[in-house]
Amino acid sequence: MAASSSIVCFGEMLIDFVPDTAGVSLAESQGFLKAPGGAPANVACAMAKLGGTAAFIGKVGKDEFGYMLADILKKNGVNAEGVLFDEHARTALAFVTLKKDGEREFMFYRNPSADMLLKESELKMDLVKKAKIFHYGSISLITEPCRSAHMAAMKAAKQAGVLLSYDPNVRLPLWPSAEAARQGIKSIWNEADFIKVSDDEVEFLTQKSADDEDAVKSLWHDGLKLLVVTDGEKGCRYYTKSFKGKVPGYPVKAIDTTGAGDSFVGSLLVSMAKDTSIFTDEAKLKQALAFSNACGAICTTKKGAIPALPTVSDAQALMSGSK
């Protein structure tokens, strides 16, 4: 049975190994905590935790970590029918250091990892076509056969009238070069209905300052319904065909920024799936973005991505406490 999930996330799920002490380098760290990760999987869990209907499509290794990840999706209420287990490749690993300010450095083990080996023929296309929103990143564009599977799923979603959501999630160490990353990320830019980028990603993609409005405008394309730029603790900026503005963030004591962007996107997609008039109704959009800012902020107050994802009441408590 393929129950329809209103939001389907496609891409990688992996294990993040995070030092048990904040602010140390990978070399200095004495021990590591294992945390489930992978942006599209984090987004799926974020949505399910907020009461959205989410599914994840991707491949993990037929190994202890792969089984653990599939189990975490199910425990978090995510439809895991689209999860595949590769007989030969391992589940991807990432060692993530948290510097003193909670920002991250990555070291990846993917040579190749199971997520890169997802083939078009293995895709659960009925899940994709029945979705309201199909969400993806750019890591699945780096290598074949996963790139072709990604392109085919995107095409099927578009033809079925599904809304395409893109959060590039730039991870430079995974691309052959910075230029390859820029080109790869932009290769599918004009397909998306909704794009979320961080201020750092604006700088990387445009090679200009994220404060430069013209730089941000260069990322707009006519098929877009909404472009959102996240500015960390400062909040976010939004751009649609007919209006633009900013929504302030919520001040919290950040200890780990892992998953904050995914928490933000997940909550925005839940709002979008409930009511697509947020693309044309600015007051509704601002409300949805304030809620997303609160979800992103809460996520930074705990270690790891999925364990730190907020519930609706968590976010509402932060919002009402900050008025």
Image: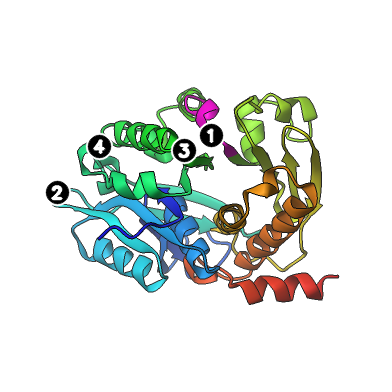
Question: Of callouts 1 and 3, which one flags the residue occurring earlier in the amino acid sequence?
Answer: 3
Q: Nearer the viewer, residue 47 or 16?
A: 47
Question: Of callouts 2 and 4, which one flags the residue occurring earlier in the amino acid sequence?
Answer: 2
The residue at which mark 4 appears reads as 120
Q: Nearer the viewer, residue 233 or 124?
A: 124
State the image coordinates of residue 145 (x, y, percent, origin top left).
26, 33
Measure the C-alpha gap from mark 2 to mark 1.
33 Å
State the image coordinates of residue 103 (x, y, percent, origin top left).
61, 54
Stretch of the chain drawn in magenta: 186-194
Measure the C-alpha gap from mark 2 to mark 4.
18 Å
**SS class of the residue under badge 2?**
loop
**Residue 98 lies in quadrant:** bottom right
The residue at which mark 3 appears reads as 161
**SS class of the residue under badge 4?**
helix
**Looking at the picture, which amino acid does disc 2 mark?**
His
Answer few, some or many: residues within 10 Å of disc 2's Cα (few below 14, many 20 plus, some between 14 and 19).
Answer: few
The residue at which mark 1 appears reads as 192
Viewer can see residue 214: yes
**Looking at the picture, which amino acid does disc 4 mark?**
Glu
Question: Of callouts 2 and 1, which one flags the residue occurring earlier in the amino acid sequence?
Answer: 2
Mark 2 or mark 1, which is nearer to you?
Answer: 1
Residue at x 79%, y 30% (from the top left corner) = 213
Looking at the image, which residue sits at the far left? 87
Question: Of callouts 2 and 3, which one flags the residue occurring earlier in the amino acid sequence?
Answer: 2
Question: Of callouts 4 and 1, which one flags the residue occurring earlier in the amino acid sequence?
Answer: 4
**Looking at the picture, which amino acid does disc 1 mark?**
Ala
**Looking at the picture, which amino acid does disc 3 mark?**
Gly
Viewer can see residue 26: no
Q: Which mark is residue 315?
A: none
Mark 2 or mark 4, which is nearer to you?
Answer: 4
**SS class of the residue under badge 1?**
loop
Is there a contact, CB below 8 Å, between mark 4 and mark 1? no
